[in-house]
Image: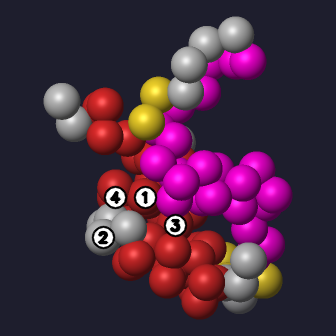
């Protein structure tokens, strides 16, 4: 996932940087680094765990508690 792809993911889900940070369990500053692709002039790689979490969130998964439990979908959070 490239920085531009990360930003497109966030915008497609109509999330602010703050919303994306909360959904991914990160600080807003990390979202800014991922979107710019740089941190203090150095290239920033988006970790596989974050890329996979982006996919899960895009598919509507809000949380995962293990294989024996039902997936919690984002729509259920809003109720």
Residue at 43% across, 36% down: 73
Which residue appears at 49% of the width and 83% of the height? 8
Mark 2 vs mark 1: in front = 2
Tell me residue 43's x, y (percent): 78, 83
| Separation (CA) of disc 4 from disc 1 | 5 Å
Q: Is residue 22 left or right of residue 4?
A: left
Q: Are marks 3 and 1 in contact (CB under 8 Å)?
A: yes
What are the residue bounds of the magenta stretch? Answer: 44-67
Residue name at image x 29 percent, y 32 percent: 77
Q: Quadrant of the C terminus?
A: top left
* Label 2: element kind: loop
Earlier in the chain: of badge 3 and badge 2, it is 2
Numbered circle sitting on residue 18:
4
Q: What is the spatial separation of the Cα atoms under label 3 and label 2, in whole angstroms? A: 14 Å
Q: Earlier in the sequence, mark 3 or mark 4?
A: 4
Residue 24 seen anywhere in this rendered image of the structure: yes
Label 1 belongs to which residue? Answer: 20
By what rule are the colours in the image chosen? secondary structure
**Disc 4 + disc 2, Cβ < 8 Å:** no
> Marks 4/2: CA distance?
11 Å
Task: Say if residue 50 shows up in the picture.
Answer: no
| Residue positioned most to the left | 79
The circle drawn on residue 31 is 3
Q: Nearer the viewer, mark 4 or mark 1?
A: 1
Residue 6 at x, y = what percent?
58, 76
Label 4's element?
helix
In contact (CB < 8 Å): disc 4 and disc 1: yes
As drawn, the label of residue 14 is 2
Residue 45 point in image, percent of width and height: 79, 72
């Amino acid at each position: 996932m490239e920085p531009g792809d990360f930003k497109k993911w966030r915008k497609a889900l109509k999330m602010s940087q703050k919303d994306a940070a909360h959904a991914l369990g990160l600080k807003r500053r990390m979202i800014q680094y991922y979107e710019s692709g740089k941190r203090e002039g150095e290239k920033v790689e988006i970790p596989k765990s974050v890329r996979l979490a982006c996919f899960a969130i895009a598919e509507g998964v809000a949380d995962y508690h293990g294989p024996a439990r039902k997936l919690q979908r984002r729509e259920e959070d809003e109720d």
